[in-house]
Image: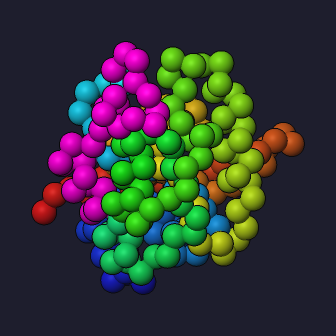
Amino acid sequence: MRHTFALFALLFSISAPVHADAVADALRAGGVAILIRHATAPGTFDPEGFRIGDCATQRNLSAEGREEARRIGANFRSLGLVSGEVLTSQWCRCRDTAQLAFGGARDWAALNSFIGAREKEAAQVAEVMARIAQIRPGDNPLVLVTHQVMVTAITGIYPQSGEAVVVAPARKDGRDTVTVIGRVAAPAAR
């Protein structure tokens, strides 16, 4: 177990070492969701007039971001982890992160950014929370590639590009919520 943890710490650069054992154990055991902020895409926000179906109008992954996404997937594979369903925002930077890291994903509009459309936030967050609530103990990890605003809305954590937040489904006061197990920093270039 210690050897596995050492490999995990080396490969994933866990950003909260105090919780490293819990994160590694949760990923191996399953029954969790991994919320990943897309890999590095320089700048902030999308250009005025961007279109979801047209990558040329969006802020996209840089060459560094594309390599970062590949490293995310390589790290998961090196640990022998098998992801369950992989879902992605329809934005190109999220789709590309999912493709490069996991070989593909299914588009899910609930994971889209709601910057500039805050009226959609509550419904989208509720939809994502409902999906996380469907996870059962032992299920392969559900991978959700999305944007900072979605990760923050669900967890209260402001992730860096390529950072993952591992959560378990929970119920509190009769509603779906999550328990944050830990954070996994974007893997550094070698």
Q: Residue at x 57, y 69 (%)?
A: 84
In the image as oriented, which residue stretches furthest toward the right?
174
On the picture, is 163 further left or further right than 135?
A: left
Q: Is residue 49 found inside the magenta-colored segment of the image?
A: yes
Quarter holding the N terminus?
bottom left
Residue 100 figure quarter: bottom left
Which residue range is magenta in the image?
47-72
Quarter holding the C terminus?
bottom left
Q: Residue 140 in the image: state x and y as whole percent.
A: 59, 72
Whether residue 55 is situated above or below residue 178 in the rendered picture: above
In the image as oriented, which residue stretches furthest toward the left?
190
Q: Can residue 13 be seen in the rendering of this structure?
A: no
On the picture, is 74 further left or further right than 132?
A: left
Q: Can residue 65 be seen in the rendering of this structure?
A: yes
Q: Residue at x 51, y 17 (%)?
A: 116
Q: Residue 48 in the image: state x and y as whole percent.
A: 37, 16
Residue 125 figure quarter: top right
Q: How many marks?
A: 0
Whether residue 161 is situated above or below residue 5 in the rendered picture: above
- The front one of 174 and 51 is 51
On the picture, is 129 further left or further right than 92?
A: right
Q: Residue 143 in the image: state x and y as whole percent.
A: 53, 58
Colour convention of the picture = rainbow
Q: Residue at x 33, y 20 (%)?
A: 47
Q: Is residue 13 found inside the magenta-colored segment of the image?
A: no
Whether residue 1 is situated above or below residue 138 in the rendered picture: below
